[in-house]
Amino acid sequence: MPGIDKLPIEEALEDSPQTRSLLGVFEEDAAAISNYINQLFQAMHRVYDAQNELSAATHLTSKLLKEYEKQHFPLGGDDEVMTSTLQQFSKVIDELSSCHAVLSTQLADAMMFPITQFKERDLKEILTLKEVFQIASNDHDAAITRYSRLSKRRENEKIKAEVTEDVYTSRKKQHQTMMHYFCALNTLQYKKKIAMLEPLLGYMQAQISFFKMGSENLTEQLEEFLTNIGTSVQNKTGLVSSIWERQFYFTQGGNLMSQARGDVAGGLVMDIDNCSVMAVDCEDRRYCFQITSFDGKKSSILQAESKKDYEEWICTINNISKQIYLSENPEEIAARINQSALEAVTPSPSFQQRHESIRPLVQSRPTAAHTSSTGSVGSESATLSALSLDSLVAPDTPIQFDIISPVSEDLPGQAKSSGQTGRRANPFGESGGSKSETEDSILHQLFIVRFLGSMAVKSDESPDIVYETMRQILAARAIHNIFRMTESHLLVTCDCLKLIDPQTQVTRLRFPLPNVVLYATHQENKRLFGFVLKTSGGRVDNRQTSICYIFESNNEGEKICDSVGLAKQIAFHAELVSIFF
């Protein structure tokens, strides 16, 4: 191979210091190669041993499955279906065991044999020749030493001849062993790369052959058999132990979604269009209900945290199953359907329990979260709604799902108190030539939020109004199939709250901090938070109206509320200082 250094064999006769120095470098390289090859050999041997163990274990599994029909279980009768199923599995696993056995043989021939040969033959030859060369070199040095001590007297001629013959013989032996040693070291430089690549190539070829054999054995008929068994196992829940996990559930259009705590986004559970939902008795748990897909092939059993959640989830799934969210008047149809769906359950009679509908479910695989409120619209009677909502929400209150851009701030119906401006704002108060209105503020905290909606409210005395607004906005989004949300940067200062466009840095909305009279985050889902803003115009029943804004954050609802509270404390302290000093 070009480019590989080699020991000059012709210099073996001279045995100069330079030659010995170069020989030392080659010996160090041979020792490093030997150490690395030994480690690689051990790793490959572990792979080979593991494959042999897997092959034996697979064969044992197949054997045990065949012996199932010979077993006598005290509480088990003859089950021909189970026996037949296990026999089929035994045949498949037996074929896989044969594939594993073939793979073990191929690994032995194509991977272990080459590296073992290199280790036992070439590397050991280097060590042997090194020892022989060292002995020959020592003998030559001893002969030279004896020759140099010869006397000049005539009577020593016979001894001189013997010593001279000894020097000749030892030097000849040294030259021969040295040339063999040099040749072996040079050959090692050529073989070391091939010795590593050959077993790796054999390993990959054996694995590819194994996968091809497995692909041929797993025919379409076998895949159909496995699919049928999987469906049967899912339907027969008595054969599988259930594990109850807590997750958040919510609906998007005609889909039931779930999201584990800490996940960035939710995943699809099932399509609930034309599905069926019913109350079920499940183990020793209360408030359980089962959702079954329209084709009956998939079902989920959920457990609600309270009877209120239990009732509203049943009503919500019924509404979505009838696809009323696609109709022109979903509220009226939902009320009519829910009346019949709730005949077997009793609605909760107070508003104190009403906002619990935005608390999460506890269920068999997951559990519903605040987003369960997206299905609670229409789950209570009209009389109950009139008693509870009229004291909190203005009659015929519209819900605004989008942020009105600054260029439309002069349009009729938009409150001036929103403080929208068309200028570009730097969220950290660095605006170039002019002094920013937040430049003197000692608090600047920025959060990423998504606007869910806002609506006018008649009260700002209790966090219940924030919870109820969350429930109504999420329910309206679910009914009207609205999933788009506007992302903004929320800047909290001691003067105001600002919604800033993340792309253009234009202030979309500005909320004066003194007008923010109430703020709260969801009790369970900390991504949801909202605040109530007193407006400067408009009164209902001789009281000043307020607007409740609801947002979704990146799991920072509590941090945002704490930041707003800190801003109000700083502003209050600054006001006291200005009064007294």
Image (cartoon, rainbow, N blue to C red):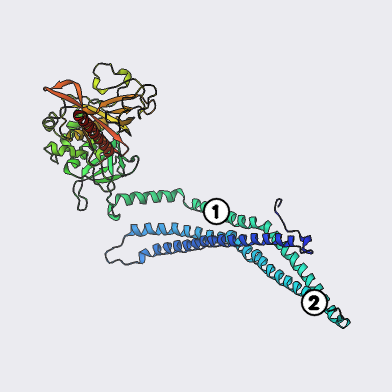
Along the line of sight, the residue nearer the viewer: 119 or 434: 434
Q: Residue at x 59, y 57 (%)?
A: 199
Q: Residue 276 placed where, x, y %?
A: 25, 40
For the C terminus, which image quadrant? top left
Amino acid of disc 2: Arg
Q: Residue 451 placed where, x, y %?
A: 29, 30
Amino acid of disc 1: Ser
Residue named by callout 2:
149
Question: At numbered mark 1, what does the secondary structure look like: helix, strand or loop?
Answer: helix
- Outermost front residue: 581
Residue named by callout 1:
209
Which of the 4 image quadrants contains residue 279?
top left
Q: Residue 356 placed where, x, y %?
A: 18, 40
Along the line of sight, the residue nearer the viewer: 439 or 527: 439
Seen in the picture, residue 52 relative to 539 is either above or below; the reply is: below
- Outermost right residue: 154
Question: At numbered mark 2, what does the secondary structure look like: helix, strand or loop?
Answer: loop
Sort mark 2 into few (<14), some (14-19) or many (20+) by Cα contacts within 10 Å: few
Whichever of callouts 1 and 2 sits on the residue coming sooner in the sequence is: 2
